[in-house]
Amino acid sequence: MAYAYLFKYIIIGDTGVGKSCLLLQFTDKRFQPVHDLTIGVEFGARMITIDGKQIKLQIWDTAGQEAFRSITRSYYRGAAGALLVYDITRRDTFNHLTTWLEDARQHSNSNMVIMLIGNKSDLESRREVKKEEGEAFAREHGLVFMETSAKTAANVEEAFINTAKEIYEKIQEGVFDINNEANGIKIGPQHSAAGGAGGAGGAGAGGAAGGGCC
Amino acid sequence: MYINKIGPFQWRRFTFFDIHNNVDKKKIAECLQDTHITVSTSGNGHVVLCDVTGWAHLITRNWEVTSFKAYELTVTLAQQLPHDPYLVTIGDDEAGVNPLIKVWDWSRSDRHGNPTCVRVSRAVPSHMRQTPVTALAVHDNKNLMAVGFQDGSVTLFRSDIARQRSGKMKTLPDSGISPITGLAFKGADKLFVVSRASVLVYWLGTERCVTLDTRGAPPSCCVLADSHRLTVAIDDAIYCYTTEGRGPCYALEGEKVRLNWFRSYLVITTNELSAASTSSTQSAKSHHITILDIQNKFIVFSKTFEAIDAVITEWGCIYLLTKSKEVIYLEEKDLQSKLTLLFKKNLYDVAIRIASSQHYDVEGLIEIYKQYGDHLYGKGDLKGAIEQYVKTIGWLETSYVIRKYLESRHLEPLVQYLEELHKKGCATEDHTTLLLTCYVKIDQHDQLGKLKEFINTKDKAIDFDVDVAIKVVRQVSVEDALSLATIHKRHDWVVKLLVEDRKDYSRALHYIADLEFEQAEFYMRKYGHTLIQHQPQESTQLLKLLCTDYKPRSKPLVDEATLTGRTREPDRAPPEDFIHMFLSNSERLIEFLEHMSATPGCSKLVYDALIEHYIHVWAKSTENEKAEYEAKIMKVLKDPEANYDKDQTLVICQMLGFKTGILYLYEENKLWRAQVALHMRSGDAEGALAACRRRGGVCPRLWLDVLWWPPPPACLPELLHVIDSQKLLSPILVVDCLTSTPTYTLGDVRKYLMDVLKSESDVINREQELAEKYRSESEKMKAQIQRIQHEPVTFQSSRCAVCNRPLELPTVHFLCQHSFHQHCFQSYSESECECPTCAPSGRRPPQPQHAAEAMHARLRTDHDPYAVVSEYYGRGLFNKLTVVTGSHETPPASAPAPAPAPAAAPAPAPAQTYGPGAEAKLRLQEGHSKLVSTNSSKPGSGVVPVPEGRMRANERVLEQQRYSSSLEANLNRLEPIRQKTSPLASPKPGRREEQSARGSPKISSAIANETAKNPFEEPVYDETKNPFADDEANDPTNPFAEDEDYDKNLNPFS
């Protein structure tokens, strides 16, 4: 399917906070109560529309376990956006956010848009982390914050789409170098011709355009 | 340590493979006993093993080995094409670094029985620096071959691999300097290149190289999975790459030795470093085989073997070749066994995943869901169980599930199941009922308002039978049922609920008023009765509308149709159908019917009902209102438009005693007698008399009716006067009648009796006088006859009666004292026997043929006399006997000289036979009579007596005629010209004998009467012999006469 841009996302956070469920809800619009642990990195994609443009989101769902940290780290690079997820019913997942954030900042490009997600908002009765706390953390670290529920699908779309919007804005502002794929942004086939004509010279991007044509 | 830390805990592990040892019966071991396998490849039904000594071993499925010396020294790489009998090998024929590429076609044997070598070429052109070959990839299309080298370069051969002459050979740029460890073609235009340091993809068409990863992999640790994803095994994980970039990765720790792809499994060989081996010697080296199911993400086999030289995936199986040349066969369990295994562990979710990924048949899957559900149910996870049961909808008997949940008290899972059932359209009526019942129970318990929610789902997310739902909900909450019915436009239910349950009749009416005509009509028919009972006012209004020009209230007054000019036929229900609904509510009915009768063209029934109910109301109302209603009723009755059934109305009037109406209807139906009777019954003699006065002229019988009904004495005088003056009843009978009533006194009838007696005596006197006069006249006549016979006649006239000149001979003289000149006589006279002066007035016009004569004539000629008689009878010939018309009154009066008449009369048959002679004789007689009269010196008086008598007779006849005609009303229309005397008077014995031969006495009497007018025979006799009063007086005893009169008066057709 033709798209104007392709954004690469990464979902990070402690194990069991619902990263895979968020992805499943976003891509398949369903919820799987019993979900296997993610071992390694998984992968999902969906088309969205922003500003009238088709944008393909390619989302990396990473394993949250400490043991896989080394594997998942390699995926930070080349992501334009990250969803940093914690579980509002588990205080420790919130406490680990700093580590995650450091990790992400360290291994990704500096322009990556990070959205803080407090998941499982449907389990209000078991809440351990107040929404305000999440908001405060986000403010402190310059993140966008949102509470979601992968079960009820509340705010799930918004989380992904808002992140995409932010990235899109950054592209418009020229913060991202869209010709460097390491930024996690790729110009779609229909844009590539224009990109080539503009003479923006990255060898990789130029090559990609050619490949697309073939 | 690292391995132990994470490896075992991450993946689910199963054993879906069975291990079979010694499948080759040691054949391989025999062949390859002493050597060391360097490379293995398989394809096209064969496995190829190459060893360090340069031998290649081609193995068939039956483990038959064909060995041939491929290289002098050693074979380093080999690839068997999957679909062709071509084997590509790279090895050394001589010492030093000079690898040769050989292509073998093992379908063709050379003279030694070995596969034919179709091509030998140098892997590295001679001008380039020789470097060892580390990787080989041959494209299935046999036109592409890539060779990777120790120094990191990749050479691409683009030519038919089976041809000796190599075509283009090209070294790819930018491939780095680390040894190439793996090559894989992706399609014909992309090549994955894996080196120790990186993973690249080459776009062969554009010679573009994209770095997918900056980490490489050890040799034989990359494979093209699913023929599109490059899977690379590194120590910490297995990474997937597409030509676009990185794909997912699977964390699996271990030092990878080999990676193979089998169906959807990754067969991973890792170095097993036992605690012992790391510490001491490396002699006990062993390998660990892990088979990973990529799709379902679990490990399906995991076991440590002794050192493994090759993993062979051919013939749909996995074979492991150990260092000791033992072939181990890993047989995949069949699906059923896998599932059984999983069931044992209660891993139903996994079972489902596997089953669906292997396209297990639906019924099998359903069975798994069911078992899973049962399992969860058994564990008490009712909600989880229902989710599984939901998946069985459409296959599993619903009662199985429902029964389980009915037993427990957990309704919510059941509701969930039922809802799903409805969504999938598998629900029956009972399911709907059950679901709603569940809703109700839950609502009772938790106040969740589920029912409301259910009802208000407007888009009908859950497919259910609305009627059933309404029925169920109705039992619980009428209001909810109502809203359900309203939402789904079940008008029938809405109205029914409103009327029967809510008793909200007004709302029901409003609802009906909004419906389309047909429906509104239907529901008014159905519920009209109840509605009228409770909401008479509004119901009547609606009905009025419905029966005139109905339009749904919700519609605009002027709709499009009328705007566009099309005239809409007004919808109008027949009001008759609604009348019965107003049972016992006459007032409303009247209102309704009044409205209806105001519109044109309504039916009889409407008027009937209207009148009936008017009368009913009238009967019930008080005196004051009565007048009002009476006026209304009479207005309808008198309305020429009102098309009501008079008879029925009359019956109703009579039942309820609505006298005004009865009288009017009697009047209308010409039932005057009944009218009079009614008046009399109610004691309203004055009314009766008024009716008599009004209609007595037409129906004189009315007077008699009043008389027979003993009227109050006050009325008697008028009554008796009429009876007397019209001669309706003979005085004897009147007296008889009056005496039967004891209340009358003589004083009441004195005047009448006096009058009667007086008139009787007058008549007698007059009769006597006449009798006297006639007697004297006859005396005179006798004398004159005598004179004529015996005395001479002198003709003394001196002038001709014609020319009035003096008579001259020859003359003609007549006995009537007229004399003529002969020539005058001849020129004036029509016949010589008649006096021209007397003849014209004496001659009568020819008698019109009488009905009786015509009938006789027809009786004689017709072949069917009976038919003629009956016809005449039907025309009323015999009904009436006395009619005298003016045409017969006048001739006798103006004919003083009746002389010639007898001759013309047809009746006396014997006279006719005499012919002219008789005429002459009569003439002579006439002459005598004339002479007599002339002689009597009173010329006029001599002729007078006879006519006078006849006049009298005629007067009597007239009198009588008036009498009888008034009695018998207008019975005689058919034969107005008949001239009859009273039938009672006419028959005479002689006549009867004479005419008996001609038929019935009636006919003969008619004939007799006919002849009776003959002036010569009858007048005198009649006059004296026929006193009418006497006849009447005598007659009442005659049953025949009386009966006849009576019948005719009652005859409705008259």
Image (spheres, coloured by chain):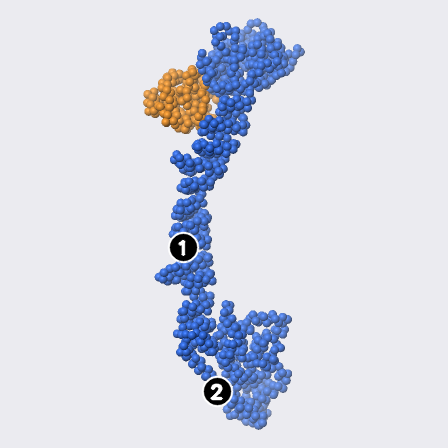
Give the residue at the far top of this rendering: B95
Residue B244 rendering spot, x and y as whole percentages: 47, 20
Q: Amino acid at mark 2?
A: Glu
Give the spatial CA distance, label 1 vs label 2.
78 Å
| Residue closest to the eye, B1041 or A143 | B1041
The colour of chain A is orange
Q: Secondary structure at mark 2?
A: helix
Against B22, residue B588 (above or below) is below
Task: Specify few, some or many for label 2: CA neighbours under 10 Å numbering under 14, 14-19, or 20 or more.
Answer: few
Select label 1 or label 2 by which is in front: 1
Subunit ID for the residue under disc 2:
B
Q: Nearer the viewer, residue B393 or B956?
A: B393
Look at the numbered disc 1 and give the secondary structure of its residue. loop
- Image quadrant in which the N terminus of chain B is located: top left
Percent from the top left, x then y, of residue B32? 60, 9
Q: Residues within 10 Å of mark 1 (few under 14, many from 20)?
A: some
Q: Which residue is mark 2?
A: B769
Palette colour of chain B: blue
Q: Position of residue B262 (x, y in %)?
A: 54, 18
Name the residue nearer the viewer: A11 or B717.
Answer: B717
Q: Is residue B223 visible?
A: no
Instruction: Count all numbered tags in the image, as a single digit.
Output: 2
- Mark positioned earlier in the residue sequence (1 or 2): 1
Amino acid under disc 1:
Asn
